[in-house]
Amino acid sequence: MAPRGSRVTEGEPIAEVLAGAATVDLPCPADGVLVEKLVAEDEPVHVGQFLAIIESK
């Protein structure tokens, strides 16, 4: 996942998710700053789960 405090742009990949045998890039949903990560690297996640908080201006 992108580092905390980094500026992110809508559509750019901010995380990779391993789904079965495939690795998928997750696009950023909005422009802003990644202010908090809600999951640790390699932590299992569920469909629809929030992964981070992005502050937009």
Image (spheres, grey):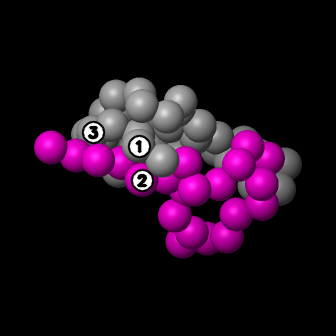
Classify mark 3: residues with Cα within 10 Å, few (<14), some (14-19) or many (20+): some
Of the residues under marks 2 and 3, which one precedes in the sequence?
Answer: 3
Q: Quadrant of residue 7?
A: top left
Which residue is pictured at 22% across the width and 46% down the height? 56
Classify mark 1: residues with Cα within 10 Å, few (<14), some (14-19) or many (20+): some
* Mark linked to residue 53: 2
Cβ atoms under marks 2 and 1 closer than 8 Å:
yes
Residue 53 rendering spot, x and y as whole percentages: 42, 53
**Magenta run includes residue 52:** yes
Determine whether the residue tagged by mark 3 lies in a helix, strand or loop.
strand
The quadrant the N terminus occupies is: top right
Nearer to me, 4 or 10 = 4
Q: CA distance from mark 2 to mark 3?
A: 10 Å
Q: CA distance from mark 1 to mark 3?
A: 9 Å
Which residue is pictured at 52% across the width and 64% down the height? 50
Q: Which residues are magenta?
A: 37-57
Q: Amino acid at mark 1?
A: Val
**Residue pointed to by mark 3:** 32
Which residue is pictured at 55% across the width and 48% down the height? 37
In the displayed structure image, the side of residue 11 where residue 48 appears, left or right: right
Q: CA distance from mark 2 to mark 1?
A: 6 Å
Determine whether the residue tagged by mark 2 lies in a helix, strand or loop.
strand
* Mark linked to residue 54: none
Determine whether the residue tagged by mark 1 lies in a helix, strand or loop.
strand
**Magenta run includes residue 16:** no
